[in-house]
Amino acid sequence: MEQYVELKNKNGILRGMIHIPEGPKDKKYPGVVMYHGFTGNRMEPGFMLVRFSRLLMENGIASVRFDFWGSGESGGTFDKMTLSSELEDAADILKFFRSREEIDTDRVFILGLSMGGTVAGYTAGMHDSDVKGLVLWAPAGEMKNRLAEREEAIAKEVFKGDPLDMGGLVVGKQFIEDVKSLNILNATAKYRGDVLIVHGTEDKSVPPTVSKHYNEIFGKRASLIFIEGANHTFQGAEWISRLFSASLDFIKERI
């Protein structure tokens, strides 16, 4: 079953899709909460989140994926969103998913792409007992560091144009102020479960060294996989196949 769902929280209306495997009505399924990246949406490039949701469903695993407030089809506008608003959305989405009668609350995983990985790590750290495992796809780490890298590129004239213009989406100044006030990885480090981290070696948006840092934070509980040649969103048939296979294996081994 694939069903459109809405969630109203303090920020506004969030719109998403929930995927539940076919089976007896009283059966409870393990599940995955997915968080999209910065300027992204609940589908992501190449429909990668849709495809992975359906792959999970084929393997008896439920999932949910929402557009964050200010993104995709959810309420709000992008220039008003902040990292803090996404962290609030993420906690509410996790609570929503765990409240569904079809979901086995002892087997709920969190998955995040790029800044969605930043959000996923923080959420896992803040809700440690509610999360069975954490999957990070090219996680962005501390967003204040990504902003500093962008500012450095502008100073060196590597990047030209309006620094607040992200492909036609305007970043609000409150987003920048909010990011600079947060210490995301301090909360992320509180997560005590198993972690899978996957990163492309040719990622031009988030340095692969960021995933090495996550691996150091989680220590022996983490598995780090680098996919040779892959870009930030793994947009190549072989790359996406390896990403999906590693992620599915990680989840199935823990349910």
Image (spheres, rainbow, N blue to C red):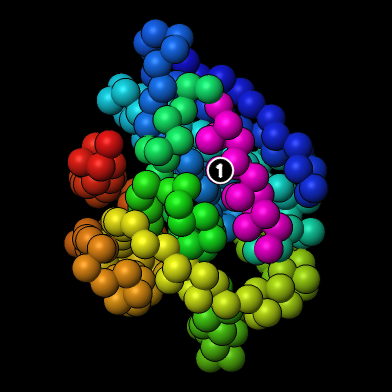
Q: Is residue 200 left or right of residue 232?
A: left
Quarter-wise, where is residue 21 in the image? Answer: top left
Q: Split into 4 quadrants, where in the image is the C terminus? A: top left
Image coordinates for residue 167, horizontal then vertical, percent = 62, 59
Q: Residue at x 45, y 52 (%)?
A: 129
Q: Amino acid at mark 1?
A: Leu
Q: Is residue 70 left or right of residue 42?
A: right
Image coordinates for residue 241, horizontal then vertical, percent = 23, 41
Q: Residue at x 60, y 55 (%)?
A: 39
Image coordinates for residue 82, horizontal then vertical, percent = 71, 63
Question: What range of the chain is rendered magenta?
Answer: 84-100
Query: Magenta residues: mostly which secondary structure?
Result: helix
Quarter-wise, where is residue 83 in the image? Answer: bottom right
Q: Name the residue nearer the viewer: 63 or 231.
A: 63
Q: Which residue is mark 1?
A: 94
Q: Is residue 23 left or right of residue 140?
A: left
Can you say whether 103 is above or below 136 in the image? Answer: above
Q: Does the stretch in magenta take in 98? A: yes
Within 10 angstroms of label 1, few (less than 14), some, or many (20 or more) residues? many
Q: Name the residue nearer the viewer: 222 or 57.
A: 222
Q: Name the residue nearer the viewer: 155 or 208.
A: 208
